[in-house]
Amino acid sequence: MSQFNEKPEFESLRMEMEVIGRNIRSSFHHHASSFRNAATVSDESSTEENDDQVELQWAAIERLPTFRRLRTSLVDSKLLNDGKGEEGGKTLIDVTELGPLERRVFIDKLVTKIEDDNRLLLQKLKQRLEKVDLEFPTVEVRFQNLSVEAEFKIVHGKSLPTLWNTIKNIFSVMINTIRCKSEVHEIKILKAVSGIIKPSRITLLLGPPGCGKTTLLQALAGRLDKSLKMTGEISYNGYMFNEFVPQKTSAYISQYDLHISEMTVRETLDFSARCQGIGSRGDIMKEVSRREKQAGIIPEADLDTYMKAISVEGLKRTLQTDYMLKILGIDICADTIVGNAMNRGISGGQKRRLTTGEMIIGPTRALFMDEISNGLDSSTTFQIVTCLQQLAHITDSTILVSLLQPGPETFDLFDDIILMAEGNIVYHGPRSNILEFFEHCGFKCPPRKGVADFLQEVVSKKDQAQYWYHRHLPYSYITVDMFIDMFREFHVGQKLDDKLSMPFTKSDCHKNSVSFSIYSLSKWDLFKACLAREWLLMKRNSFLHVFKSAQLVVVALITMTVFIHDQDKIDTIHANYYMSSLFYALNRLMVNGISELSLMVTRLPILYKQRDFYFYPAWACSIPSIILKVPFSLLDAFLWTGLTYYIIGYSPEPERFFCHFLLLFFLHQASTSLYRLIASLVRNPPLAASCGLLSSLLAFLFGGFIIPYSKAIHDCYKKKLYKYKAFKRNVSTISLSTASLPAWLQWGFWISPLAYAEIGISVNEFLSPRWQQILSSNTTLGHQVLKNHGLNFSEYFYWVSIAALFGFWIIFNTGFTLALTYLKSQGSSQTVISHEQLSHLKGKDNLSNVTEGKELCSVNILERLAETKTTGMVLPFEPITLTFENIQYFVDTPKLILMKNGGRMIYSGELGQHSSKLIEYFEEKQRFSQRIEPSSTGNDEQDLQTVIGAIYIFVQVMGISNNSSIIPFISTERTIVYREKFAGMYSSWAYSFAQVIIEIPYSFLQAVLFSTITYPAINFYWSAHKVFLYFYTMFCTLLFFNYFGMLLVSLTPTYQVASIFASFCNTMLNLFAGFLIPGPKIPKWWIWAYWICPTAWSLKGFITSQYGDIEEEIIVHGEPKAFSVFLESHYGYRYNDLPVVAIVLLAFPFFFAAAFAYAISKLNFQKR
């Protein structure tokens, strides 16, 4: 440890001290011992000598500048350098440089027996302030006529969120919207309650569950949900809520334990202490030091060290953390991670104490604590409440604690009692008068009955009669309203009303008693604190990041061996393989960041909690998470590019290698930011997983590869296109257009990040020198390839793509920050209750008096004015001037070229006499359209491949969405299964069987809806066996995707690892599905992967069942081929293989279901 004698500014001070008394020992060790045992006695002469030394050392401290003086103190030399310091000596130190072991030893010396030593410490603090005429700031909380109302929605029947109830509620909302009728009603949670929470007193809040205790605590702490309607007044020392920041003046301790599982107990408290700051402790310490210097008072060294150490702002590690760990009894697990349901961490009781310590470690003077005894034994509860009592009595804090069933010894520690029932305050006053009040009402607590239990039962209609002690008078139920009236007449209630009628004098309170600033630290300090935590979490999750990168390397190795090609084969056919490999690279890099979604969505509740407590602003949390993911994007893009670029055989120029790498980097950043945004918007793990995969698949759909953006026109001269049994003819010149995105969907191309990446990476490759061969059509091979895929953009569009991806990165991260700023945790939603529950709450048997909502439906008609804007045309060439002379133009035979919007050719040829040939063409075309199906297959192989691409996307969207959405559910259920299986409640095979069976009707319904919508939309052949095979294939596909997701959860330890494995497996299913690279073209060393790939069999089942028996012809590279011949030669699909395909499709779900059941029975990843 660096000490002051090593610093230049302390050199003269150290020399002076050495001259005065180098070998003099300090007696302060005995002062510290007397802190624990006042009976310690030392030699009188030695004490005088040591006192002289302390005075000299303290005189040296007082000569320091104020900033240094407030950080400098005396400690035992034995505490320094890991206990190797000089025995019995005193050393000047900077309190901010105490090491972890030194802080722990110092607190162990300061507080040994928690109840006694903590009281002595607080008393010494107060006595030191009183010596210089200072006091602790105090806060008096008043509330008058406080009412809170909540909106709720009535549902018919039970309010459980079952599938049937959800469907009924949806229809009910639709009907009520049409009828302009609202089912939203209001109910009062708090009913005009009033009271005073006094400083220097600890108050107990009692009441049965549902009486409004939590709502009252949240309202007083300024943490009430904004969806609740609050009326009345709440003031702190006379200041209303709009005059100061109540969230920084008070601390609300929730009854729910929300902590980051990867952090240790000490790290959690250190971060909380750092963000909450020191409040008024710094100003108090400065004033105490100034006055003691003027009065010549020498403070006790250990006390001075403690006060100075907790008065320094912005420390990463603070002495207050060790003190809090000690008094809460969690110092034994200080370096243990918090843990969760799957990873072993601290116990439930320790987690409850951590929740308490996380909030009271700050400088707030008012504490509102909700059910802090949950999960604690009575002894621990007594110890914590004892420390709270000492904090209130000695340091004048204001404390209100809600306990459900406190023990008698804990109950006696409280000064005041607030008893609530049915949203009202029945009693609010001293604990010593509460039994007197109820005896005044006619009820008496039995001798051996706990007072707390008596108080909660006496206001209950069911239990009240047994406490009636006026035997000579008949008993009748005393309602809550009657109790309230009697309390107003009771002397305690009258005193309370008198105090509430007297306004609080603001001039009497301390200037630092309430906070007027939102955050405790500067923006830079808050950013550094959040950055340090994010770095810590990244290190704790290093396995996930390393595993993800290792997985990317494996996928890259597989990909480069699948798409390996001879660089000398530069033609149109091999260009398609290059295009597929580029698309797959974009696909892989885009989904590689999906693990960010699962990591972020699990942390959101903690982030929202700390944001609402004003630990930090949302941007201080979002920016570090954005910055620290940049190196991973660089690493992943470099790994993929370095492994695959030259092996696959892309253009060898170094600058194109760098451009390839740069574009993958920006795409990875944009996709990672997109997944973070989805997590922050959806906030529900299963739904976020589905939305993340759906957004990725939609990006693939509109990416420009599967369905081209623009239309590429191909001329086929004098080719025999179709043969008909009743009609045969040769067409002289026909122009056929490739299928592309409809005009009304082309906006999707321009808002897809993958589309810009596809443009940039394709332009970078196909405009390189090796693709500049001139074709017969007077265009280069590279331009023709880009044109065929609808990506015929100029070379500068590469930089446009980079700029667009950077823009998406900015937009997604901005949206992520705004979502963290303004959205709240998804757990807060509108209450839904049934008619029976409402009757119970209202105390009625029917709903005749329920007031209907007064919301009226209104339709606002907005008129928009369209402005016509004139824009210029950008020419893709340089205009030149041509001069002609003696030009003659004539047409030998009348001809017609008929086109429709978008450039599609309808007719090109001779008109004939009286347009006879044109009429004949349209007559035959009408008969042709009725006989040739499906109409969507088009005229050439590009049209057919577009349809196959649509089927491929359907399989990916439906399958991967089911696969990803089931993983969070099974992960949650697995922890319960482990516990219940251990308890012997049921066999794991019974659970597995039930889980497998329940997925069948869900998948069946999905398959029915899918087939009903897509089959007629694509206009397939309307044949019974084709429709059935289409439905059967999708049903089996959905089943094995669901079971495969369940299997992944059973084979992996955590939800995050399962998500990473799922992304890996999904990309493999994508690669070997037979679309990006057909089965016959896959290298022989990977053909086995094609035959065991479920999606390959699904795609084979879909396409073969619909087109495998069609003998009509299409144009394939200028030559007519039958559908069946093309499918067999290009994809390897044979119609006779359909029975085998059907069997294999059914075998996959059986295999995955059996593997899931076996893994659940044999594997247990719970580390508890």
Image: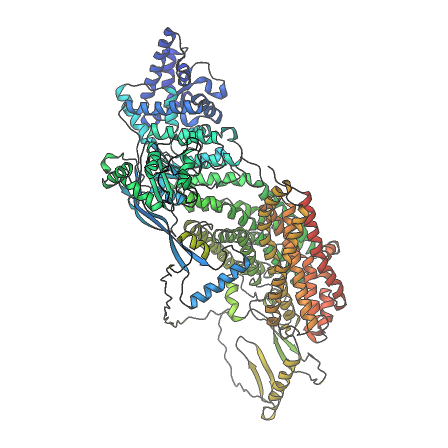
Q: Percent position (x, y) of residue 598? A: 54, 48
Residue 127, compared with residue 280, is above or below; it is above
Residue 198, picture quadrant? top left
Residue 1062, compared with residue 375, is above or below; it is below
Residue 487, compared with residue 903, is above or below; it is above
Residue 37, picture quadrant? top left
Q: Residue furthest bottom?
A: 914
Q: Percent position (x, y) of residue 756? A: 53, 60
| Lateral position of residue 250 relative to residue 1122, left or right | left
Residue 433, picture quadrant? top left
- Nearer the observer, 848 or 41: 848
- Nearer the observer, 575 or 85: 85
Residue 677, compared with residue 439, is above or below; it is below
Identify the image's colour scheme: rainbow, by chain, secondary structure or one colour.
rainbow
- Residue 1 makes an appearance in the image: no
Quadrant in which the C terminus is drawn: top right
Q: Percent position (x, y) of residue 647? A: 67, 52
| Lateral position of residue 67 relative to residue 1098, left or right | left
- Residue 1146 makes an appearance in the image: yes
Total marks drawn?
0
Q: Percent position (x, y) of residue 382? A: 44, 30
| Lateral position of residue 56 relative to residue 107, left or right | left
- Nearer the observer, 674 or 629: 674
